Amino acid sequence: MALSVPTESLTEESLPTDIEELLKLAEKTGAALAPLAADVDAGRADGHETYRILRDAGLLGLLVPREAGGAGLGFAGYSRVLAVLGAHNGAAALGFNMHNVAIGSLCESAATPLPPAADAFRSWLYDEVVRGRKMFASATSEAGSGAKLRGVRTTYRPYADGRGYVLTGEKSFVSLAGVADYYVVAARAEGTEGSGEVSHFVVAADDPGVRFGEVHSLSAMYGTSTAGMVLDAVPVPRSRLFLGVEGMSMYKLVREPHWMISGYTGAYLGIAEAVLRFTTDYVAASPRRAASPVLQRELGRMAARLGAARALVHEAGARIDSGRGTVGANAAVHAAKYIVGEVGPELAQDAVRICGSAAVNRSQPLERLLREASFASVMPAKPEECLEYLGKAALGVNLHDATAFDW
């Protein structure tokens, strides 16, 4: 039975739009999520309660434009909110990020005039998120190719009457499996294997032919409810073709990769913040430890490295907000992803050395944080991919050319 956490104090008539008020809401929501983390991590709960809390807090509309009823956050503000949530419950923050990865690029198009079909799709999605409190998720990864669009084998074909499509394929790691209401599925037209023309479709959880496997037994992030997804000749109406355009997904990713490769960087920054917080509290609990110059220097070194990572994440977010799609902005999010992926595990190792047995005691949150921090390098873009992108950017390679990088 899921632990029940009262959320009356979390629900609001409308989502605040001021970043400081949103950070306060994230802190309040995070405090409600924190007690659930241990049970979900240990497999004693399925994690669905965490997403109910996030829904009830109204946070699903963080990125939706203000005129459509959301908070209208940009990438920088979102990263800050996600870090607050991640410091309380890393798995919940990562799962929540999958909702925003699925809708982020569309929310950023708010000021862009679109053709009628695309505009209708955009309005429908905003309404589903804000008024319907519907959760979206991304379904891209496949066995053997991960999240790289060029390797997608899931296919689609049009109805004979042209009013929709039929999707067939399998996805290997779908977060929010059985939790989200909709899944944004990457697929290619039948007969186009090896090309860069990939499309996205919104598939409802209850569409005929959709089914999920058992939730993967992971060594960390169990609460993301990650499982395989089978699409067995799933009918999708034309109105659920993402933005009403086929074959543009690769182009969009190459130009603006920040959601795919760095949307969850804020969550891993929050996990690193939690590691430092636990270690500091551990040292402060003993006057003898707190008075040790050696431990003071250790904490100072941890704080300085975390501060540098935090500043880079904030800078990358600001550069995306002011110059989305530029190579400089894209390089900044690759750098932030790389640094957070390095700093988190390094701080975890520092914590092990300082806290000793507390680091391996399953009754303490640090043991979970150690495992969670290490998985930043598994998420795209992987460390070597980040470095390759940064090196090519430094050399002046045209990174808007889809063949310049393994997407």
Image (spheres, helix red, strand yellow):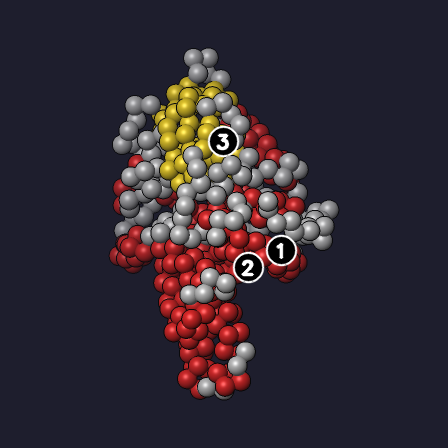
What residue did someone put label 1 on? 32
Q: Which mark sits nearer the N-terminus, 2 or 1?
A: 1
Q: CA distance from mark 3 to mark 2?
A: 31 Å
Residue 379 is situated, as x and y percent measured from the top left of the image, at 38, 50
Question: For the residue labelled by badge 2, is the local secondary structure a helix, a strand or a loop?
Answer: helix
What kind of element bears circle 3? Answer: strand
Task: Identify the residue at horizontal 50%, vertical 63% (top origin).
Answer: 363
Q: Which residue is mark 2?
A: 88
Quadrant housing the C terminus: top left
Tell me where residue 403 sits by quadrant: top left
Secondary structure under tag 1 reads: helix
Query: Can residue 111 be seen here?
Result: no
Contact, mark 3 vs mark 2 (Cβ under 8 Å): no
Local crowd at mark 1 within 10 Å, few (<14), some, or many (≥20)?
A: many
> In the image shown, does 180 or 331 lie closer to the viewer?
180
Rendered location of residue 19, percent (x, y): 62, 58
Q: Quarter-wise, where is residue 129 in the image?
A: top right
| Residue drawn at point x = 73 percent, y = 46 percent | 13
Disc 3 vs disc 2: which is toward the camera?
A: 2
x then y, percent, for residue 270: 50, 61
Determine the image quadrant of residue 374: bottom left
How far apart marks 2 and 1 lie (CA) works out to 9 Å
The image shows residue 397, relative to residue 206, as above or below, that is below
Residue 64: x, y in percent?
Answer: 59, 44
The residue located at (49%, 17%) in the rendering is 163
Answer whether residue 2 is visible to the viewer in this image.
yes
Mark nearer the N terminus (3 vs 2): 2
Instruction: Look at mark 3 in the image and give the residue it sits on.
Output: 202
Label 1 to label 3: alpha-carbon separation? 31 Å
Q: Amino acid at mark 2?
A: His
Vertical position of residue 105 compared to residue 384: above or below? above
Instruction: Classify mark 2: residues with Cα within 10 Å, few (<14), some (14-19) or many (20+).
Output: many
